[in-house]
Amino acid sequence: MKRFYKQAACVKVNKSFAIELDGRPVKTPARNPFHLPTSQLAEAVAEEWAAQGEDIDPATMPLTALAQGALDQVAHERDRIINRIAAFADSDMLYYRGGDSQQALADHQAEKWDPLLDWARQRYDVSFTLTHGIIHKSQSEQTIARLSDAVKSQDDFTVAAMLSLVGLAGSLAAVLALVEEVYDAETLWPLMNLEELWQEEQWGRDDLAVETRAIKQVEFFAAVQFLVLSRT
């Protein structure tokens, strides 16, 4: 799409903040008002619009996309989105450890991942069933229910960030620790890529894997930025 405006700005609208292009309010793709909860998030979104060249490139506007998701999807399909996030309560990456022939990896995972799961156990009064290898073992109904409730308690903008983050991290426990500001993104990102980084140390780097991880890292930190700015 060609750029059709000269200026982008954020303006206060009651208790929210809107984005205006040449004085005209932006709407979401579903034609909902583009109202954001904080001035900091609105300013950052306005900067994305202002930074566009002759053509508008949605790929360079991650905060805008996440805000649209909160306003169009989470606000109107909240239960469906929450269920997608909560599904990771039963399939968290942190539950799966190296198999019988990978004891060194399993030990490394235990060292790095167990403190995170210990925090989740105490915070939500849950238990976890770990498995060695890739065979799925279901978590208890109580664990799934309590972690699901933790997701349900979040506002729409946090849920939108969590949907992106849990898909990139593969771990609901890690994302909840991030939301509750127990872990920061710089600490969590290497933990979420622990096995891949371990394999690189053992066998050398895979250029395609490194490139893919770099792309995901940009998306991950954009979602973290959205989370932080929506609450500031």
Image (spheres, helix red, strand yellow):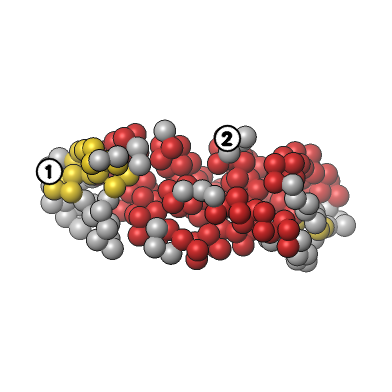
- Disc 2 to disc 1: CB gap under 8 Å: no
- Is residue 54 something one can see in this rendering? no
Quadrant of the snapshot with the C terminus: top left
Instruction: Classify 230 as above or below 212.
Output: above
Q: What residue type is labelled 2?
A: Glu
At x 57% / y 35%, what residue is drawn? Answer: 181
- Is residue 186 something one can see in this rendering? yes
User: Whole-percent x and y of residue 127?
Assistant: 78, 51
Asked which quadrant contains residue 121, the reply is top right
The residue wearing badge 1 is 23
- Residue 181's label in the rendered image is 2
User: Whole-percent x and y of residue 134?
Assistant: 76, 63
In space, the residues marked 2 and 1 are separated at their CA atoms by: 37 Å
- Where disc 2 sits, the SS reads loop
At x 35% / y 55%, what residue is drawn? Answer: 71
Pick the residue in front: 205 or 56. Answer: 56
Q: Is residue 181 left or right of residue 223?
A: right
User: Whole-percent x and y of residue 84?
Assistant: 55, 63
At x 71% / y 51%, what residue is drawn? Answer: 94
Q: Which amino acid does label 1 sit on?
A: Gly
Q: In this view, does 195 lie to the left or right of 149?
A: right
